Image (cartoon, rainbow, N blue to C red):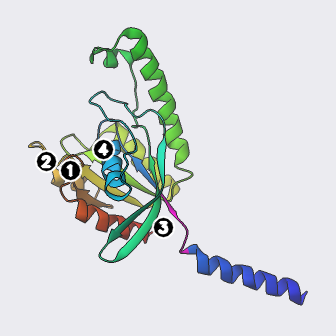
């Protein structure tokens, strides 16, 4: 009896002590072409020297979940290690004919549409395995979309900590205030994954997000 009590006590102390050392799984979510993979590539290039995936101007270039283990970032003498999970873009509708506008042949467009649909399902499933989420939005686009509502709804139902990143602030049509107004309950950071603008503020925000896990 005494031995069992001692073992249970030791186990509780072990869990309390090592809980803070758990590696965070950080998921990147958002609509297609918002810049999720571009941001993931910049982070990985900055801290690991390697990119995580391919980008293009054709929607749904990322159609499978891809991840980088043990990405370690540093900010003001603080260090954070996490697993970076880059997910396919979420969409409420996928039509292969939309891909044909980018000069894809019908068969290739149909294949891309099928893979994109499967990628969305995979993205939603991965919500069960991430500790926090970075929602990447195109700051030149209307944030009040059905896609964004769907993403937020899934996160709220799971009580997952969120950081909203308004990407493409280097573009003239960027409207950071509109993004912030659409998501007043979350911290919103404006960046340019392409140019690296405001990445220092982004990394600082990631540290704040990690404390909510």
Q: Are circles 2 and 1 on residues that touch, CB within 8 Å? A: yes
In space, the residues marked 4 and 1 are separated at their CA atoms by 9 Å
Q: Are circles 4 and 1 on residues that touch, CB within 8 Å? A: no
Is residue 24 on the magenta stretch?
yes
Residue assigned mark 2? 170
* Residue nearest the viewer, comparing 47 with 100: 47
Q: Is residue 160 something one can see in this rendering? A: no
Residue that sits furthest to the top in the current view: 106
In space, the residues marked 3 and 2 are separated at their CA atoms by 31 Å
Q: Residues within 10 Å of mark 1 (few under 14, many from 20)?
A: many
Residue that sits furthest to the left in the current view: 172
* Residue nearest the viewer, comparing 37 with 99: 37
104 is higher (above) or lower (below) than 131: above
Mark 2 / mark 1, whichever is N-terminal: 2
Q: Secondary structure at mark 1?
A: loop
In space, the residues marked 3 and 4 are separated at their CA atoms by 25 Å
Q: Secondary structure at mark 3?
A: loop
Q: Are circles 4 and 2 on residues that touch, CB within 8 Å? A: no
Mark 4 / mark 2, whichever is N-terminal: 4
Identity of the residue drawn at 52% across and 49% down: 127
Q: Secondary structure at mark 2?
A: loop
Q: Which of the two marks, 4 or 2, is nearer to us in this view?
A: 4
> In the image, which disc is placed on residue 203?
none
Q: Which of the two marks, 3 or 2, is nearer to us in this view?
A: 2
Residue assigned mark 3? 213
Residue assigned mark 4? 38
Q: Are circles 3 and 4 on residues that touch, CB within 8 Å? A: no
Residue 112 is situated, as x and y percent measured from the top left of the image, at: 43, 22
78 is higher (above) or lower (below) than 145: below
Residue assigned mark 1? 192
Q: Which residues are magenta?
A: 20-25
Q: Quadrant of residue 87?
A: top left
């Amino acid at each position: 009896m005494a031995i069992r009590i001692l073992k249970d006590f030791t186990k509780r102390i072990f869990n309390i002590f090592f809980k803070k050392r758990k590696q965070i799984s950080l998921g990147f979510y958002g609509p297609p072409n918002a810049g999720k993979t571009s941001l993931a590539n910049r982070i990985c290039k900055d801290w690991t020297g390697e990119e995580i995936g391919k980008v293009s101007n054709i929607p749904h270039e990322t159609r499978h979940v891809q991840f980088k283990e043990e990405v370690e970032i540093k900010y003001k003498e603080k260090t954070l290690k996490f697993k970076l999970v880059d997910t396919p873009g979420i969409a409420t509708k996928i039509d292969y004919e939309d891909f044909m506008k980018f000069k894809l042949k019908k068969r290739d467009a149909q294949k891309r549409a099928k893979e994109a649909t499967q990628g969305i399902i995979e993205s939603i499933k991965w919500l069960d395995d991430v500790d926090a989420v970075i929602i990447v939005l195109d700051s030149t686009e209307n944030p009040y979309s059905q896609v964004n509502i769907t993403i937020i709804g899934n996160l709220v139902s799971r009580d997952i900590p969120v950081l909203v990143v308004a990407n493409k602030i280097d573009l003239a049509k960027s409207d950071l205030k509109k993004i912030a107004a659409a998501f007043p309950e979350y911290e919103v950071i404006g960046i340019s994954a392409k140019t690296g603008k405001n990445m220092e503020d982004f990394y600082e925000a990631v540290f704040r997000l990690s404390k909510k896990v």
